[in-house]
Image (tube, rainbow, N blue to C red):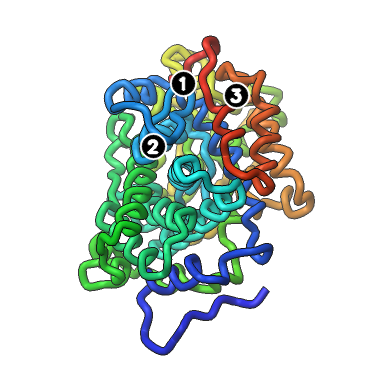
Amino acid sequence: MMPFAADTSHKLTIAETLAAYFAGKGFSGDAIPSDSMALYALDTLAMALGGAGARSSQIARKALFSGPGAATVYGAGTTASPAEAALLNGTAAHALELDDDHRTSVMHPGAVVVPAAFAMAEATGASGRDFLRGVLAGYEVAIRAGDAYEGGLYRNGFHPTAVCGVFGAAAACSVILGLDEKAFARAMGIAGTQASGLVEWRTDGSWIKRLHPGRSAQSGLMAAQLAQGGFTGPVSVFEGDYGVFKALGHGAPVRASALTKELGKTFLSLGTAIKPFPCCRFSHGAIDLALEAHTRLGGRAPDALTVRLFRTDVLTYHKRPTNTVDAQFSVPYLVAVAMLTGKVGLSDFTEEAISRPEILDLASRIQVIEDPEFSALYPETYVTVFEIADGASRFELRNDCPSGDPEASAYRTDPDLLRRETIAKTKRILGECGYGARAGALVEAVYDLPHAPNVAAVAALLKPVADGPTPS
């Protein structure tokens, strides 16, 4: 594949460079891996359908639904305008903390990009392949924007999924709408002025984190619609004197080149991880080690455990979670659950589950240390080390790349493993949420999208069922 080369007859801004590729002739045909995005579309749509039953999703639908429209509201038995559907479905996609995650950009691209792209594809009658092309464009732009900040947004109180995701949603919808280069660049400018999302949920475990992907999906979709209509936006939105790099970077270095480096040659989207556990991705290395320790110790609690990991500005070290959301970010709680039960699943995040005495007893004895050496390697590498004392035995366990990440050794030696795990995850989670009977059909319909004239067959499978448990 030949690398993309932008017109250099005049200096292009970052938004214009992105537009030249994604709205140009190079981003079409069999040369781009759009069919590979079916894996991520499946994971996001399945987790959003399961998450539609969460109380936060139910409240959002009741508060914000304004009437039927051209796009499906997952798990609700109704339709809404594309923008409203993107909002509600993006919020549902993040409700279970099971949506995909990209390691170096420290963001969840799917929960923003897929609901926006799907709503736009439904509304316009786009083919399945064009939907997947939009998803690929959205992931690329969102991930590259996240890479530019190198994990720094969290330190400034901003949620990368929300801030960077809005650009991905705008890119996805711009591709599906077939915007030309000028309109695509305008959409980036319009999206950028809506980039926001605070990390203050850490203080009380509130639901604003779940809202972020929905708002960014809605804002990105609207940006593309406005640009299509001729609304203007600054094409210097990234690197301009008052652009997002300066506004949200707080004086820290921003790697602007990440947005355009090897554009059209390297597809960062294919490095997106599928989350195996319904909790903060930064904790998954610790959970992997806790499961290993569970096997090694036969499910017994060790005498002492120290967890050394990297600074994230997101994880908490609360010994006793204050609520279910807080539990999804509490390292001591998550490690204790995995070590004692040999699993971490949706059933571990109910009010009853987070109060189990035996879990809280072990959590109270787990020490967590942010290691400066490991923090220096973040976000490229997520190093986690366990120091375990069990009677006279002392041993260490180490994890450099958590399960579900395509860069982990298991997936390099077995390239089909991630696909198999994603299908199994889809069937398991949808079964737990009352949609097990249709999980197989959803897998088939999503993987048939490269040949489908539209996305209607998938949309038909995103309707509600009467039974099934309601996630918290």
Q: Position of residue 322 (x, y in %)?
A: 34, 23
| Distance Cα–Cα, label 2 vs label 1 | 37 Å
Closest to the camera, between mark 2 and mark 1, is: 1
Tell me where residue 319 appears, x and y as whole percent. Answer: 40, 27
Residue 136 placement: quadrant: bottom right
Q: Is residue 322 visible?
A: no
| Residue that badge 3 annotates | 430
Q: Report whether 56 appears left or right of 139.
A: left
Going from N to C along the chain, the mark reached first, 1 or 3, is: 1
Q: Which residue is mark 2?
A: 316
* Mark 2 vs mark 3, CA separation in Å: 29 Å
Quarter where residue 247 is shown: bottom left
Q: In which quadrant of the rendered image does the N terminus lie?
A: bottom right
Sequence order check, earlier mark of 2 and 1:
1
Q: Nearer the viewer, residue 410 or 332?
A: 410
Q: Position of residue 365 (x, y in %)?
A: 47, 28
* Cα–Cα span, label 1 and label 3: 17 Å
Q: Is residue 274 visible?
A: yes
| Local secondary structure at mark 3 | helix
Residue 49 at what x, y percent from top left?
52, 28
Residue drawn at x 70%, y 35% is 444
Q: Disc 1 marks which amino acid? A: Gly
Task: Give yes or no for contact between labels 2 and 3 (Cβ–Cβ under 8 Å).
Answer: no
Q: Which residue is mark 1?
A: 77
Compared across the picture, whether 16 is left or right of 277 comes to: left
